[in-house]
């Protein structure tokens, strides 16, 4: 009996001796990032024994997540941030992110990036995050409609007062001789379009650019000034005149599809750089203020409290080797033009359509109407094929676009989260703008209410 018990004990000891190294070496890494990222998948395959846990904690806003970092309840080892939603510099300065300088791979990668990008991910000469992508918010004209309207680059406004002056002259022209072929803006939801639509859009632009300039200058954000009151009065008049003189947006035959401005929405971010830099314009409130291009930088970081820093940095290294070219072209000083991966497929489809249409045209029994339709279709396909040879269609980022970007990169401004930029706060701003546009609030009441809300928010953040 004793011999049997001893044998059993030995067997248990042998099993434990075999299993303990496995359990001792088993580690867990928690993350908040896109699991479909090819770099994440490569890291996962390279670490089959590592337990990877996705952090599903929901935060209502960036301030809640910052609070979790402060209290140590933020459990992700690796996570993503955005300069537009997170106060990254504050997070860095408080030591909530692990320094990445031990990674030669990451240091080498960052050394190739534009200085203004590097500044966004460093603090006190330490590398604290890995940039992953960049988006912009800029304003641009539609050059075809602009030329068709007989306008030149000299007519492009370069400040908010200049924009209002331009729109006033456009209204004068429309009132003297209606030109239904071109609208100022065509991209309206026709079911929501109203006499207040232009007033709402212009007021939103004014408030957004006013806050942007004050935040850039490090000045308190306040709204109730004589200058702002004057601009609001002009907006109300011009917005109504535009509505009165332009055809309804659903009336495509009367000009619903042509617009002077291709991009003129406040805070509308995208990852595409304009085809022509000279089409861009800026809306500072004062002529003396800088011309800024608002930008947001996405990045990956390692929690300063992580218990697996080496593994977390290895994950960032893996992410860095698989970042899509069209997302990183704006990060690197030595970036190359990026081809459009869909161009060849579009070319093949168009050539196939041309061949089919040409074959149909060989039919001698076609009616004149059928032949005309096919010839029109053939001309359309041939025009499409020709357009596919242009840089605009061949590239996501052409050499000329890249050259323009490099000369203008110093205009990029990365604002930290400000007032009214997310959640309920943004909704409150939209409500106030709607009430002003509808005449339910006058200019002084609108600006005073904005000041009251901002002062309250400042006190809550202290």
Image: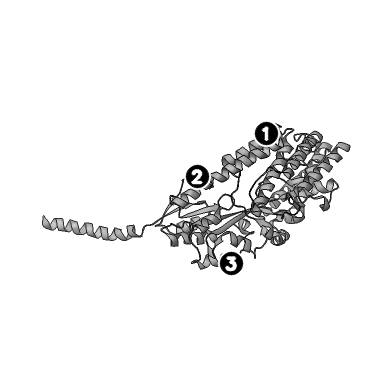
**Crowding near the residue tagged with mark 2, few <14, some 14–19, many ≥20 C-alpha atoms within 10 Å:** few
Q: Nearer the viewer, residue 122 or 43?
A: 122
In which quadrant of the rendered view does residue 451 lie?
top right
Q: Quadrant of residue 298?
A: bottom right
How would you rate the neighbour count of disc 1 (Cα within 10 Å): few for under 14, some for 14-19, many for 20 or more? Answer: some
Specify the label residue 111 is tagged with.
3
For mark 2, what is the residue?
59
- Up the image or down, 151 lies above or below 373; here it is below
Q: Is residue 435 visible?
A: yes
Gap in angstroms between the C-alphas marked 3 and 2? 33 Å
Q: Secondary structure at mark 1?
A: helix
Q: CA distance from mark 1 to mark 2?
A: 30 Å
- The residues bearing labels 1 and 3 have C-alpha atoms spaced at a distance of 50 Å
Q: Position of residue 264 (x, y in %)?
A: 72, 45
The N terminus sits in image quarter: bottom left
**Residue 192 point in image, percent of width and height:** 69, 33
Residue sitting at 55 percent across and 62 percent down? 122
Given this view, does label 1 or label 3 mark the residue nearer the observer?
A: 1
Q: Secondary structure at mark 3?
A: helix
Please say if the residues under marks 1 and 2 sit with CB atoms less than 8 Å apart. Answer: no
**Which tag, 1 or 3, sits closer to the chain's start?**
3
Q: Earlier in the sequence, mark 1 or mark 2?
A: 2
Nearer to me, 213 or 100: 213
Q: Position of residue 235 (x, y in %)?
A: 75, 40
Q: Tell me if mark 3 has few (under 14), some (14-19) or many (20+) residues whose alpha carbon lies within 10 angstroms of its own.
A: few
> Outermost residue toward the right?
176
In the image: residue 213, left or right of residue 424: right
Q: Residue furthest left?
A: 1
Q: Residue at x 66, y 59 (%)?
A: 338
**Residue 204: percent from left, percent from top:** 69, 42
Pointer 1 residue? 435
Residue 367 visible in the picture: no
């Amino acid at each position: 009996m004793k011999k049997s018990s001893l044998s059993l004990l030995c067997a248990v000891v042998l099993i434990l001796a075999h299993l303990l190294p496995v359990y001792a070496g088993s580690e867990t890494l928690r993350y908040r990032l896109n699991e479909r990222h090819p770099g994440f998948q490569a890291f996962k395959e390279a670490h089959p024994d590592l337990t990877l846990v996705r952090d599903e904690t929901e935060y209502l806003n960036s301030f809640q997540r910052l609070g979790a970092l402060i209290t140590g309840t933020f459990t992700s080892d690796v996570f993503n941030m955005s300069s537009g939603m997170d106060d990254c510099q504050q997070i860095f300065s408080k030591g909530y992110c692990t320094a990445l300088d031990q990674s030669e791979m990451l240091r080498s990668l960052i050394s190739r990036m534009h200085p203004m990008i590097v500044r966004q991910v460093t603090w006190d000469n330490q590398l604290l995050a890995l940039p992953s992508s960049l988006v912009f918010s800029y304003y641009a004209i539609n050059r075809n409609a602009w030329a068709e309207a007989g306008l030149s680059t000299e007519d492009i406004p370069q400040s908010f007062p200049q924009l209002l002056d331009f729109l006033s002259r456009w209204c004068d022209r429309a009132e003297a001789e209606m030109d239904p072929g071109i609208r100022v803006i065509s991209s309206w939801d026709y079911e929501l379009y109203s006499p207040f639509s232009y007033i709402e859009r212009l007021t939103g632009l004014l408030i957004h650019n006013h806050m942007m300039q004050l935040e850039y200058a490090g000045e308190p954000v306040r709204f109730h000034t004589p200058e702002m009151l004057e601009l609001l009065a002009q907006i109300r008049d011009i917005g109504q005149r535009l509505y009165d003189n332009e055809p309804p947006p659903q009336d495509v035959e009367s000009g619903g599809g042509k617009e002077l401005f291709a991009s003129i929405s406040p805070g509308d971010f995208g990852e595409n750089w304009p085809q022509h830099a000279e089409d861009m314009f800026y809306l500072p409130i004062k002529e003396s203020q800088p011309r800024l291009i608002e930008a947001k930088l996405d990045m990956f970081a390692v929690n300063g409290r992580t218990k697996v820093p080496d593994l977390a940095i290895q994950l960032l290294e893996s992410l860095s080797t698989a970042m899509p070219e069209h997302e990183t072209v704006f990060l690197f000083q030595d970036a190359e033009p990026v081809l459009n991966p869909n161009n060849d497929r579009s070319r093949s489809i168009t050539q196939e359509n041309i061949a089919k249409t040409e074959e149909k045209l060989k039919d001698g029994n076609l009616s004149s109407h059928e032949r005309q339709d096919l010839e029109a279709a053939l001309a359309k396909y041939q025009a499409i094929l020709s357009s596919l040879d242009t840089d605009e269609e061949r590239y996501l980022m052409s050499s000329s676009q890249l050259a323009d970007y490099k000369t203008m990169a110093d205009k990029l401004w990365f604002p930290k989260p400000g007032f009214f930029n997310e959640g309920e706060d943004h909704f409150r701003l939209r409500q106030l703008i709607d009430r002003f546009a509808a005449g339910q609030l006058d200019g002084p009441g609108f600006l005073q209410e904005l000041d009251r809300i901002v002062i309250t928010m400042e006190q809550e953040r202290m």
